[in-house]
Amino acid sequence: MDITVSDEVSQEYHALVKNILCNREFLKLSLYTHHQWTTRLMHSINVSYLSWFIARASVLICSIARKLGCDEKAAARAGLLHDFCPYDFRAKTPTGEHQAFYHPKAAADNSAAHFDVTDRELDAILSHMFPLGPLPRNREAWIISFADKACAIAEG
């Protein structure tokens, strides 16, 4: 199972996330509506691509960005995995927490169970709901938090 990727999508980006986009469990996100008119899978791809683009642009604009720790691979992967929760968000959570607080932890657990995720990626996934969740602790986490909100607005 694989997602067909448009020629308009950067092959550099696709190479970073291809293993996630081929994962059967991850692709189940296509079954869930997200932000009115899109699916959770499409939302995750939108956040991922925007995050990768921002992280990559910061590297290209400022040659010292890499030395400062901006990692476009981590941004792309964490953006894709930030809502890796293949269940209906309208359902009650197992802990009774509101989805806004519960789903980042569920996404981090699912991501760690299915992929080799870095600490930077896990932090970005866990803090993407800031200010409703923990303070982002790295540049990629701030980028994911921003991209998630920007995409949510654009998606309705």
Image: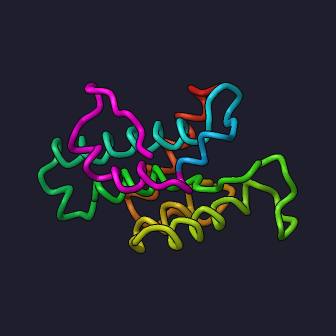
Observer able to see residue 31: yes
Which residue is nearer to you in this view: 59 or 50? 50
Region of the chain picked out in magenta, as a range:
1-26
Observer able to see residue 130: no
Could you tell whether 59 is left or right of 148 in the image?
left
153 drawn magenta: no
Q: Position of residue 66 (x, y in %)?
A: 19, 59
Q: Is residue 34 above or below residue 58?
A: above
25 drawn magenta: yes
Residue at figure coordinates x 42%, y 74% from the top left? 119
User: How many numbered badges does the structure rendering display?
Assistant: 0
Residue at figure coordinates x 73%, y 54% from the top left? 100
Residue at figure coordinates x 59%, y 71% from the top left? 109
Colouring convention used in this rendered image of the protein: rainbow
Q: Position of residue 22 (x, y in %)?
A: 41, 51
Residue at figure coordinates x 44%, y 68% from the top left? 115
Could you tell whether 45 is left or right of 74 in the image?
right
Could you tell whether 35 is left or right of 61 in the image?
right
Q: Position of residue 57 (x, y in %)?
A: 24, 41
Q: Is residue 140 above or below residue 115?
A: above
Which residue of the protein is positioned furthest toward the front in this rendering?
1
Q: Position of residue 127 (x, y in %)?
A: 56, 61
Which residue is nearer to you in this view: 147 or 41? 41
Split into 4 quadrants, where in the image is the C terminus?
Answer: top right
Could you tell whether 142 is left or right of 83 in the image?
left
Q: Is residue 56 above or below residue 150?
A: below
